[in-house]
Amino acid sequence: MNDSEKQKLRFIRERYGAMIQASATQHGHRPAVVAGIMMRETEGGLSKWCNPPGPACLGDEGHGHGLMQIDDRSFADYCASPNWKDPASNIDFACGVLREKRAYLEKHFPNLPVEALERAAVAAYNCGEGNVKKELEAGKDVDALTADADYSRCALEFALAYQELLAPPAPMPVPIPASVQPQPGPQQASAGLWAGLLNLLMKIFVKQEQA
């Protein structure tokens, strides 16, 4: 991941992080995953494909609406309203869509591991749950029919990087001044005293033997 992508993820965290956290939690998603999808779709409205840039961006030849690129071919009523231009509404609507796709796939594949289900749902966000179902049934990768055949992989890589941005920095070790370095305890001091005394007695005994 390059520096430009990291800067855009920081922008998403600072500008939309609270909205993402609220909606993701309500719909049962990891916030980082929602942020990763936003990064994959519009880079927080900063993508060169956004026209115009910002929360009211349009993409995919005018079909994708807003930060999360809600598609008017699937959600015509929502995209016909002005709500899609509002960041909080757009994010929340997207979280609802992702939840429905996850529920559909979980119903058809109840034994799918949690991580695999999450990735499948993210892929379905892009290409539809029906297509992902077909790929899973055929034993193919869930990204086979997604944009550039890497949608969920890319979004989850962004999610991982976003999660790392949220992690608190590791504390730096504090050096201990020499003045407070651990000193020998009473037992250690006594042991040293007895060792010195025994050594002195041995020298006296040897001198007496030699005399």
Image (cartoon, helix red, strand yellow):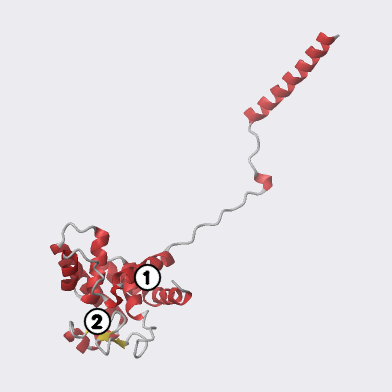
Q: Residue at x 64, y 29 (%)?
A: 188
Circle 1 crowding by C-alpha within 10 Å: few under 14, some 14–19, many from 20 = many
Q: Residue at x 63, y 28 (%)?
A: 187
* The image quarter in which residue 100 lies: bottom left
Q: Eyeballing the image, is 84 above or below 204? A: below
Quadrant (top left/top right/bottom left/bottom right) for the N terminus: bottom left
* The image quarter in which residue 132 lies: bottom left
Provide residue 14's location: percent of width, then percent of height: 42, 75
The numbered dot on residue 206 is none
Q: Secondary structure at mark 1?
A: helix
Circle 2 crowding by C-alpha within 10 Å: few under 14, some 14–19, many from 20 = many
The numbered dot on residue 158 is 1
The three-letter code of the residue at mark 2 reads Ile
Decide which of 191, 69 is in the foreground and name it: 69
Q: Eyeballing the image, is 138 above or below 7? A: above
Residue of label 2: 70
- Give the side of residue 103 with respect to residue 54, left or right: left
Quadrant (top left/top right/bottom left/bottom right) for the C terminus: top right
Total numbered labels: 2
Mark before the other along the chain sequence, 2 or 1: 2
